[in-house]
Amino acid sequence: MTGDQSLAADAERLARVVLSCGVEPGDGRTSSLVRQIGAVRTLEDLLVPKSDSCLAERLEQVDPARRLEQAAKCGIRFLVPGDPEWPTPLDQLDDAITDQGVGGTPPGLWVRGPMPLTELATSAAVVGSRTASVYGMEVTRGLCDRVAAAGVPVVSGGAIGIDFVAHDATLGAGGTTAAVLACGVDRVYPAQNRPLLTHLAAEYAVISEQPPGSAPTRPRFLARNRLIAALTRGTVLVEAALRSGALSTAAWAEALNRPVMGVPGPVTSYTSQGVNQWLREGRATVVSDGAEVLELIGESGEHLVDVRRGERRPRDTLGPVDRQVLEWVPVGAPASVDSIARLASLHIRQTEAALQRLLTKRFVRYEEGGWRLAPDT
Amino acid sequence: MTGDQSLAADAERLARVVLSCGVEPGDGRTSSLVRQIGAVRTLEDLLVPKSDSCLAERLEQVDPARRLEQAAKCGIRFLVPGDPEWPTPLDQLDDAITDQGVGGTPPGLWVRGPMPLTELATSAAVVGSRTASVYGMEVTRGLCDRVAAAGVPVVSGGAIGIDFVAHDATLGAGGTTAAVLACGVDRVYPAQNRPLLTHLAAEYAVISEQPPGSAPTRPRFLARNRLIAALTRGTVLVEAALRSGALSTAAWAEALNRPVMGVPGPVTSYTSQGVNQWLREGRATVVSDGAEVLELIGESGEHLVDVRRGERRPRDTLGPVDRQVLEWVPVGAPASVDSIARLASLHIRQTEAALQRLLTKRFVRYEEGGWRLAPDT
């Protein structure tokens, strides 16, 4: 890089810090502008007082160099596109902007923790209700355990409920996990997850497009969800009520053409209604465990799952004649050897011998002068 | 009808009685022959002793007129294609024959009970595990209750578990229901369902392609399943383990291009594994209740379901300014009016007034010198 190029890159980075601090996350219009004309010129454009004088005022107040310095003191780095650690799958957000103008690639990411974000290239998002059921938490635990064992990182939102279990189970399995927050990465929300978030910030990664110090608000949660979807290869909905925020993460994954997976749950369970609806509408694929998640997010052929077939039954071990005879032994009232032989189109002697073998193996019973199936055959 | 035509029709009917008594159900080869050359000529063909001399012998022993007479004495009628009561959707089985030669339209149906089978034209099949869970039985009950209330008959297999609840709940809701058996309609299998089957035979209909007196065997259950699928507009799988017979009914519905619906269940539940797998493979559509079943089996536009949206939230009743302000009130640590006004791009006075209204309505709290969301907003 020449000196001029390096200066230009610095200016671009600083402009991105200002945009990150002054523009609310998920502002698709700003994101599109940055993509077209770069961050420096976008910022110049926004600083000309227009209808939104508040915005210009907010942007003017930001001292980007000081913000970077303060962040660095707290062990927080700021990544921009082009940085070696920048997670390139995020760039697909350029093309994901809703009719309401929400979306787009963020100007940068604030990250706390030693894990390089490039490690998330093969990751899966596991999200769900804060008000999770015992069922949901149990399934999340098993699923993340399996995903982590395959070396696939788990990304979630650091919330209580399914998010917490997803992070916790992944850590328990010796896996890698990162939390994407709606507030600054120096803040702890929700408070009861302080030990978890502190541990992730110390050993893995806590990520936000919001600058340090920012408070979590509803629009910021919704904007945050697009990052969870965009950073990962696919999104697993474990439990989600009909208006759960987890469905917004799933909708972003759908918009990005990443697999959306849903764990089916009882139709009588409030927290499974949203997932079951997505399954009904064909917007999510049923997954029952981590192996099925790996199959759907892996490179093709990478994590193939055996189709579930049910266990092998004792019946499968019988020879052809015995099996043929067994087919015609009634489940209800006993039948004579004659009638079974006739139905099976076999000789009586052959049938008799087969019935004796089946009796020894407890497939059939001799009762009231006839043959019938043993229970549970 | 001329005298000759009537005689020919009688001969055809009698030949079908013989085939029904002598050929095992679901014999696709015989069914195809009957379709091509009629029952009389098919029977002549089968009576020429060939490799299968047992079959010819069996057929010779049948006295069809006597069989019909005996059946009539027990209140059992024999229906053949062309009869006004013949359920024509069954004829689609002509084209549903597996590679193993199983399938085809049966030569006739033995029916006990006053309900004309034409009433099944709008019916739904509800099938599932004999070893049903409390969850499965509860869902079956609610689902059949709703389907019955819409005047849609429910068809099932008269077994214990899901089948029993499907019949029973439909009766409880004042609906119409019929059982299709793998044994003769004069027999009771399973024995514990005697009261149910007796009631259905007296007030509704019990159906079988097997002649009276026949015992239930495994191949007959599998053949019977195709009738359940073919008599109905669609098949609902409530609970089914991976090798459940209910999946064979679903496979027949699939082969007939009728909707296959599945009630999702916990991935940890043995009896939901088969259903969840069908959902995963896209072979069944998720249904959560009877209304969704009605929508899928109805004429298009007949039973439209409102998309589940979750209940209306109190938030939805707010005016635009209040809602705008509420969006920016943090969920975590309290924020000042200034900071909320800045984020919402509103004047401080406007923001202050909105916050007061939101306080009255208990959407927000004033704490430690700032504003934050009330829990559960």
Image (cartoon, coloured by chain):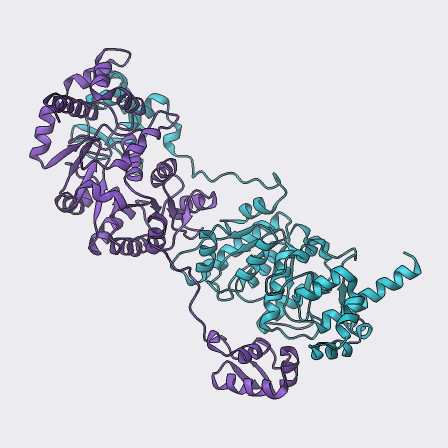
Chain colours: A cyan, B purple
Tell me the residue at 49%/78% (across/down).
Answer: B318
Residue at (35% x, 28% y) in the render: B97
Residue shown at the point (9%, 33%) measured from the top left: B72
Q: Is residue A244 above or below residue B344?
A: above
Q: Residue B221: x and y, percent?
A: 28, 34
Say if residue A159 shows up in the picture.
yes
Question: In the orientation shown, which residue stands out farthest toward the left?
Answer: B73
Q: Position of residue B30 (x, y in %)?
A: 28, 22
Q: Quadrant of the N terminus of chain B?
A: top left
Residue B330, position in %: x, y?
59, 77
- Front position in the image: A144 or A351: A144
Quadrant of residue A156 within the rendered picture:
bottom right
A199 on left or right of A360: right
Furthest residue in direction right, as rendered: A3
Q: In the displayed structure, would residue A223 be above or below residue A93?
A: below
Q: Quadrant of residue A58?
A: bottom right
Residue B75 spot, x, y in % from top left: 9, 37
- The residue lying furthest to the front in this view is B2
Note whether residue A208 is visible: no
Is residue A359 placed above or below A38 in the rendered structure? above
